[in-house]
Image: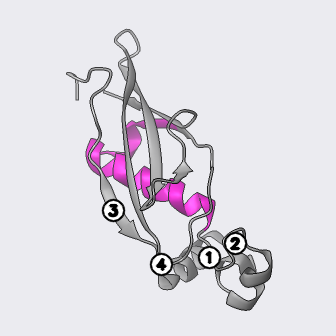
Amino acid sequence: MSGLQPGDPLPQRSVTIDQATLIRYAGVSGDFNPLHWDQPFAATFSPTGGVIAHGMLSMGLLSALLTDWLGDAGRVRSMSCQFRAACPVGAEVTLGGEVASVDDDEGTATLAIWVRLDDGSKVIDQRTSRAVVTR
């Protein structure tokens, strides 16, 4: 990791967001908003007209990608994400990022991180979402 340079890509990962994952996430997080499990409710109130994933689930998937890439969760110093689009149940999302900058004095790298739907919609936008990691 010490050879990171701005523009270096992170490995990408694709994940299908299924209903079982949403139910498990609701149980762990305590977020039982019916937008995440109740189709009739979601049909009326969801921006997609159907059940959508928890925004923090997308952020958690990014965190897992970073932890796997770094080999140590303790190397993730901070993450901030801007959520841009709802992620409908059944969607396949792709997660990734790239090195935005390197601070040799601090021994850190700032990563521009993202999550996208199959159609290219940005669930988490890399222009405003960052992770700072130790190198």
The numbered mark, 4 or 1, whose residue comes first in the sequence reads: 1
Residue holding disc 3: 14
In the displayed structure, 84 sits above or below 127; it is: below
Does residue 39 lie above or below 114 as drawn? below
CA separation, marks 4 and 1? 16 Å
Residue type pointed to by label 1: Ala
Q: Residues within 10 Å of mark 2 (few under 14, many from 20)?
A: some
Q: Between label 4 and label 2, give the one nearer the viewer.
A: 4
Can residue 32 be seen from the camera position used here?
Answer: no
**Type of the residue with mark 2:** Asp
Label 1 residue SS: helix
* The N terminus, quarter of image: top left
**Residue kind at label 4, given as amino acid type:** Gly
- Please report the bounds of the magenta region as a residue range: 54-78
The residue singled out by tag 4 in the image is 90
* Residue drawn 68% across the image and 88% down it: 39
Q: Earlier in the sequence, mark 3 or mark 1?
A: 3
Whether label 2 touches label 1, CB < 8 Å: yes
